[in-house]
Image (spheres, rainbow, N blue to C red):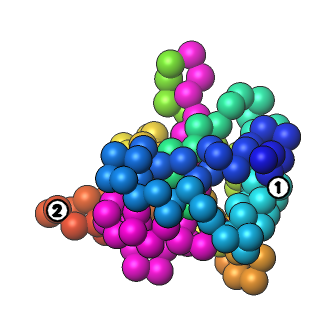
Amino acid sequence: MQLSKNFSLSELIEAGSARRLGLEDQFNPSPEIIANLKALAVNVLQPLRDAVGHPIQITSGYRSPKVNKAVGGAKKSDHLFGYAADIQLWIDGKNKNQLLFDTVLKLKLPFRQMIDEFGTDTEPAWIHISFNPKDNKRECLRARKVNGKTVYSKI
């Protein structure tokens, strides 16, 4: 099922960890979660893909509660509701995730949270972005590990 021109439902529910752990509930999201994933694709991911002109890799989209717990996700993660995706951009074998971050801001795309996760000062390892039409507060954060714990700071 296509959610937008370049994004399918299967890529937004795929989770290698779910298959590895045998958590098949991951692959049967409710109609409400599918609608949320479609809204994310239409309002954020597709306009971003169109602007950067290169495929965007989804490393995590919807997570069932069991998968979310298994990967150490936040207890109220937007991934649980189909509101969020972790994304990466690679161009000619080079990480261009900062381009994603900057482009979202330049285009003034609607989002609830955008997090530069676990990269360097110049290039995020990946970008977490969420869309919730009831709560798009455009919060920008940076996540880093400090003494083994995840610490968030506002950008």
Name which residue lies at 74% across and 70% down: 31
Residue 129 has which mark?
Answer: none
Residue type at tag 1: Val
Residue 51: percent from left, percent from top: 80, 38
Q: Is residue 122 left or right of residue 110?
A: left
Is residue 79 a member of the stretch shown in magenta?
yes
Name which residue lies at 32% across and 53% down: 21
Callout 1 touching callout 2 (CB < 8 Å) = no
Local SS, label 2: loop
Mark yes or no: residue 65 visible: yes
**Residue 75 vs residue 122, the one in the foreground:** 75
Residue type at tag 2: Gly
- From mark 1 to mark 2, how far is it between C-alphas? 36 Å
Q: Is residue 122 left or right of residue 145?
A: right
Name which residue lies at 14% across and 63% down: 147
**Who comes first in sequence, dot 1 or dot 2?**
1
**Residue 33 vs residue 50, the one in the foreground:** 33
Label 1 crowd bin: few (<14), some (14–19), many (20+), radius 10 Å: some
Name above or below for residue 138 compared with residue 106.
Answer: below
Per the rendered image, the range of residues in magenta is: 64-92
Write down the residue under mark 2: 148
Q: Residue furthest top?
A: 92
Write down the residue under mark 1: 42
**Residue 113 vs residue 141, the one in the foreground:** 113
Local SS, label 1: helix
Q: Is residue 22 left or right of residue 56?
A: left
